[in-house]
Amino acid sequence: MQSRRVLSISRVLNRLMLYLAAIFIALYILIPIYLIAVLALSPREVISQYPKPFIPQDLTLDTMRFFLNSYGILDSVKNSILVAMITLLIALIIGAPAGYALARYIFPAKDTYRLMVLTTRAFPVVILSIPLITTYIRWGIDDTVSGVAFMHTAMALPTTILVTSSIFIAVSKDLEEAAMTMGCSRFEAFRRVALPLALPGLAASAIFTFVLSWNEVFAAAILTVRNQTLPARLIVQLNQSPLHFRFAGGFFILIPAIIFMFFVRRYLFSLWGIKLK
Amino acid sequence: MAEIRIENVRKEFGKVIAVKDVNLEIPDGEYIVLLGPSGCGKTTLLRCIAGLEQVDAGRVFFDGKDITDLPVRRRPISMVFQSYAVFPHMKVFDNIAFGLRMQRKPSDEVKKRVQSSSEMLHIEDLLDRYPAQLSGGQRQRVAVARAIAYDAEVLLMDEPLSNLDALLRLEMRAELKRLLNNLGTTVVYVTHDQVEALSLGNRIAVMRQGEFLQVDTPIRVYDFPAAHFVGSFIGNPPMNFLAAQVVENATALLVEGATLPIKPDLSAALKQGEQKVVWLGIRSENIEPQSFASNDVLPARVIVVEPLGSHNLITVRLGETVVKVNAHPDLELQMEQEIWLKLNISKVRLMDKESGNAIG
């Protein structure tokens, strides 16, 4: 009896510590985001105040409008979207079949392959940057939208492959086999049964790729000079810009990531085997 | 509506031989059950017939036509999966119509066939629902209706009832039997449940480690198991096995000190062999417990008495062996009570002690 009570107290304590840690980490990330959001939506005078108000006084879109109308920003937004779309498409076209194969087939060195897929991310882009640029220049794809998209595809593929494989694992193999016993070829069984069932997950994976490309700074910055994506432009401009421009830029680049991540978190968790109801 | 012939079919998964060069002929319209413990290769063999697995050796024939190299979709089969494999993104109607639409049947025929097969399984009111809105039993009915609507020549069923609860399984079993008898389709049915096998099959093929041990009618498999394993796998409780010594001229057996005469045909078979000790197999219902000693009876001690309504299942110790016996419910028995067992000699089955194969 005694030992059981002690056990349950230590368990409660464990839980408490866990939640405290979780709250701390969440606040650590959320407070800066909140401040950026508040200040990006405040008038210019408020932004230069010190100390800055924690609770917004009068909200305005002037700051955001100023940012979007600045020279080159809209162009780079356009580039960013283009790069992200191309990345998303290529990553899905290459990654989803690989994920499907990992989910359905047993083949030699399958585990090694899975590991190799991950290790491609073990090399920081910083180390690769010089050979990357020289290669790009030699191929003539430096400073192009598609060049950045190729790089982003390479960075996104590991997650695309692993996420799509977990999506296809969730679609029972029996379903495809049942379709095959009723007159479907392998491909038809995939198209009529597995694909529709995997579609929400594939969409989530695509959105994740989009966000990854949208947020990526380093490769985009070193590979482009004039055709910059938004993060690449901001990293150059922000240090020389007025405070309100920085907040607006920071906020603008955050929005899609936050919105999309909220919708696709379920699928990203499933990559680690956690199931949300 | 097809005769199936399996010739020397072999299937390996790496080092494991799942199906070991088996031969089987299934006449047109037969309902055959592949029965065995998990991992015995029964599902693999079924999948080889379906074409979902490529055989490593051997041929499969439908109506004398070699279909070994045909892809799944060209084989005249339909299949019910253990998991039902009902398509979750389609309504029940579209599930049942799926195969018919793949065959490009005109839509009024599709409608008619869906209607008739859903009526056969009493799910005609559910056609508008999604599988997620159905219970497990209803989903299972959809799976069967879908397989029947496809109107294949061979119906393959992979443990279709194993995910149902006990009561539903009983109900569905009887319904399946009635339904499939009426259809006259050739059915290959896989199960690990011996009761299901006995109740459904025209014939049962008992499998172990990728091989057939016995292929025969349910009654023969039950009464005359061809091997020790078959007797101990089929029946509830399984067959009892006692070590028995063969006496000099093989006219009788010595069991736990008692001498039991045996039938002349068994005696003749024993004379041919060289066995000194054999397994004596006998089912619990063929042993009569009595409270007094007499000729040719074996003394035993009661360990457990389980009243089952129609009879009492008693567990007794006979020497070193534990034996299950059916007793009349009126027979009053106490724990540790000494009783005598009278074996019905005509129902005795003898097995070789080494190979486990039946003698005679």
Image (cartoon, helix red, strand yellow):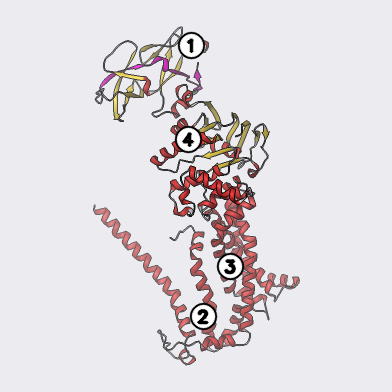
Q: Where is residue A124 in the image (x, y as percent from the top left)?
A: 60, 68
Name the residue rendered at 56%, 49% in the picture: B111
In the depicted view, which residue is nearer to us: B97 or B294?
Answer: B97
Residue farthest to the bottom? A45
* Mark closer to the observer (2, 4): 4
Disc 1 target residue: B265
**Discs 2 and 1 carry the same chain letter:** no
Name the residue rendered at 31%, 23% in the picture: B327
- SS under mark 3: helix
* Mark closer to the observer (1, 3): 1
* Numbered mark located on residue A251 in the image: 2
User: Mark 1 belongs to which amino acid?
Assistant: Asp
- SS under mark 2: helix
Disc 3 target residue: A209
Confirm or deny contact between disc 3 and disc 2 (CB under 8 A).
no
- Quarter of the image that includes the N terminus of chain B: top right
Occupied quadrant, residue B165: top left
Q: Answer above or below: position of B268 versus B6.
A: above
* Mark closer to the observer (4, 1): 4
- SS under mark 4: helix
User: Mark 2 belongs to which amino acid?
Assistant: Phe
Chain bearing tag 1 is B
Q: Where is residue B116 in the image (x, y as percent from the top left)?
A: 52, 44
Disc 4 target residue: B178
User: Mark 3 belongs to which amino acid?
Assistant: Thr
Q: Would you say residue B352 sits in the magenta stretch?
A: yes
Q: Answer above or below: position of B186 versus B359.
A: below
Q: Position of residue A33 (x, y in %)?
A: 47, 78
Q: In this view, does A255 lie to the left or right of A26?
A: right
In the image, which residues are magenta? B336-360
Q: Can residue A179 be seen in this view?
A: no
Occupied quadrant, residue B66: top right
